[in-house]
């Protein structure tokens, strides 16, 4: 079954371009696209998407406010922000509202498609510069030992280092000379060993922080 994608963006040309890109790629289907997010909860309930792509600056209701409403309604599907804004306030507020990832609109089409797959599988894709700043928001390293880190293999540690740099699963696979499916398997084991639910939490734990930064899995 293809991944069902719902789009919210007030730019007609961009919505058309995204619909053509995503809908024309095997394994994906665009089930709806809308110029505002005023009825986002109703649209999601009607179309039951696997992933939502959400702009921020839209008429009537911002994408960040829409994400908060989506979570308040108890809807749990991943929401991936796709926006021109890269300031700390919007990034932080979007993630705190319940967004699962944050990409800028200049993201390469192939990376966007990878990010949609990644967020659906429990990851937290971000533009590399955004990912580095999110890590910078984390509190000081924990002083107590974290025995679960000792259970990671060298390969699993390598996966986390690549994630921290903002690399997509497909990019990690290419650099490491393995398949994307193998990357998925490694990271699934990492999440289980570290008792976390997202890439951001896993990287935070790996670098000695408690997983209490902006919660990307609300």
Image (cartoon, helix red, strand yellow):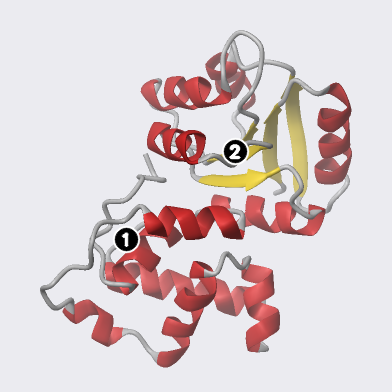
Identify the residue at the far front of this view. Answer: 87
Circles 1 and 2 in contact, beta carbons < 8 Å: no
User: Does dot 1 land on a helix, a strand or a loop?
Assistant: loop
Q: Residue at x 33, y 69 (%)?
A: 192
How far apart are the alpha carbons under marks 1 and 2?
22 Å
* 184 relative to 25, above or below: below
Of 131 and 68, nearer the camera is 131
Q: Is residue 210 shown to the viewer in this render? A: yes
Q: Is residue 125 among the parts visible in the rendering?
A: no
Is 188 on the left or on the right of 104, as rendered?
Answer: left
Q: Position of residue 209 (x, y in %)?
A: 26, 64
From the top left corner, tell me how far across and down residue 50 is, in percent. 59, 40
Mark closer to the observer (1, 2):
2
Q: Say the numbered circle drawn on residue 196.
A: 1
The spot of residue 162 in percent (x, y) is 54, 75
Residue at (74, 30) in percent of width and height: 31
Label located before the other in sequence (1 or 2)? 2
Q: Which corner quadrant holds the C terminus?
A: top left
Crowd rating for badge 2 (residues with CA inside 10 Å; few <14, some 14–19, many 20+): many
Q: 15 above or below 170?
A: above
Residue at the image point whose x is 55% and y is 21% from the top: 45
Q: Farthest residue toward the left?
A: 144
Side (left or right) of 89 relative to 182:
left
Farthest residue to the top: give it. Answer: 60
Q: Is residue 111 left or right of residue 94?
A: right
Q: Which mark is residue 81?
A: 2
Secondary element at image label 2 = strand
Residue beneath the point at 66% across and 36% down: 83
Quarter of the view holding residue 7: top right
Residue 147, given in percent of the width and then of the height, sits at 17, 81
């Amino acid at each position: 079954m293809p991944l069902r994608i719902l789009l919210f963006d007030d730019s007609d040309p961009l919505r058309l371009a995204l619909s053509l890109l995503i809908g024309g790629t095997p394994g994906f289907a665009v089930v709806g696209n809308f110029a505002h997010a005023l009825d986002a909860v109703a649209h999601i309930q009607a179309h039951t998407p696997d992933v939502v792509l959400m702009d921020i600056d839209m008429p009537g209701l911002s994408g960040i406010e829409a994400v908060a409403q989506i979570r308040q309604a108890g809807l749990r599907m991943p929401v991936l922000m796709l926006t021109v804004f890269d300031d700390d306030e919007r990034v932080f507020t979007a993630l705190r509202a319940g967004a699962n990832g944050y990409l800028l609109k200049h993201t390469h089409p192939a990376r966007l498609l990878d990010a949609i797959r990644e967020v659906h599988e429990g990851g937290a894709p971000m533009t590399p510069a955004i990912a580095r700043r999110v890590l910078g928001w984390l509190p000081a390293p924990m002083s107590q030992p974290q025995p679960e880190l000792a259970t990671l293999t060298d390969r699993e540690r390598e996966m986390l280092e690549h994630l921290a740099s903002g690399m997509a699963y497909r990019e990690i696979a290419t650099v490491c000379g393995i398949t994307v499916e193998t990357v998925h398997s490694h990271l699934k084991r990492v999440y289980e060993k570290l008792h976390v639910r997202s890439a951001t939490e896993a990287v935070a734990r790996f670098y000695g922080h408690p997983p209490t930064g902006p919660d990307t899995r609300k």
